[in-house]
Amino acid sequence: MNAPLSAPADATTTWVDRRAPAFLRPFLRLARADRPIGSWLLLIPCLWSTALAAGISAGEGAPRPVQALGLMLLFAIGAVAMRGAGCTWNDILDRDIDGRVERTRLRPLPSGQVGLLGAFVFLGLQALVGLIVLLCLPPFAIVTALSSLGVVAIYPLMKRVIWIPQLVLGLAFSWGALMGFAALIEALPPAAFLLYAGSILWVVGYDTIYAHQDREDDEQVGVKSSARLLGSATRPWLAVLYAGAALLIGAALVAAGAGPLAYAGLAAFALHLAWQVRRLDIDDPALCLVVFRSNRDAGLLLFAGLAAAALLA
């Protein structure tokens, strides 16, 4: 492995640069440990589904707050491990493309900080952590989780094939909307699939915002994205995507018999999404990143409402 270079072009100085041992920094960057927003966005649908499922089980006379909290902790560990594994797999497949994009050219693989063999070993270690977490779940949840692996594996290739690879990312990143139900009540009721569908639209929306940072570079290297496809029409389409997400999640709450506080959380979530649509400027990459990252707060607002409703169920 070559000596560590400077931080990648798409990162500011983070705890990885300040505190991590030098030999670990390239691997931590490979897993995006210096940018935890991805782990948050992978975790949040898991939190939503666990809270909503806890409300359902409470309504059936079987409240499980301790079990739900334990599941959320497992999901948090799994989200960090699997997001890191996903980023590593993405960078393995995209190492040649990343070297031609200004924002990503100093990532560990294209810059030579990590070799291909080292990346595969690191990928295996992260997958092992994910497997350990998976084996702590009920059999129904294990099968549900394993069903997502095909989508996860092909996502990095989709930007070469379809104009909205964000849709495949949505299928993968929203899988947690099923996992809380699968783990807590060992079933997938209609509310689970409605929540999953709403989460998919949310992911497509926020990742379109993110993709506008690379729109010009993607055009030069021939990579497809919803940002390139929608261009100046992004704002109205984002409004449609976010409205659809809110409506489908609202339908999930109805199907689950959620309490008033869940709808308060949904209202706060929807208002935050409306703010994003209003605030967005697709020609300002720095602002696109700020708006994209704000989706953590949007997701946590909804989770707060769902968790409060479950506790009062």
Image: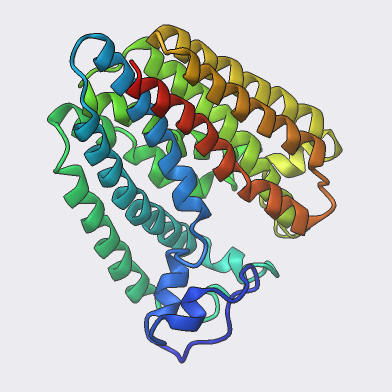
Lateral position of residue 170 relative to residue 83, left or right: right
Query: At 58% from the left edge and 31% from the top edge, which residue is drawn?
Result: 202
Q: Can you see residue 109?
A: no
In the rendered view, would you say 104 is above or below 62?
A: below
User: Residue 78: x percent and y percent?
Assistant: 30, 49
Q: Position of residue 72 (x, y in %)?
A: 30, 40
The N terminus, quarter of image: bottom left
- The structure residue drawn at horizontal position 51% and vertical position 11%, both measured from the top left corner, is 251
Q: Position of residue 218 (x, y in %)?
A: 71, 55
Choose between 38 and 215: the one closer to the eye: 38
Q: Answer left or right for 169 relative to 177.
A: right
For residue 65, side relative to residue 113 (left or right): left
Looking at the image, is 268 positioned above or below residue 285?
A: above
Q: Is residue 147 above or below residue 12?
A: above
Residue 276 versus residue 236: which sits nearer the camera?
276
Task: Describe the colour scheme in one phrase.
Answer: rainbow
Q: Quadrant of the C terminus?
A: top left
Whether residue 158 is visible to the viewer of this picture, yes or no, is: yes
In this rendering, would 283 be left or right of 193? right
Counting from the top left corner in percent of width and height, residue 208 is at: 67, 41
Name the residue rendered at 70%, 59% in the picture: 221
Q: Looking at the rendering, which quadrant does residue 238 occupy? A: top right
Asked if residue 27 is positioned above or below residue 177 in the image, the reply reads below
Number of numbered labels in the structure image: 0
Q: Residue furthest front?
A: 312
Q: Residue at x 64, y 67 (%)?
A: 10
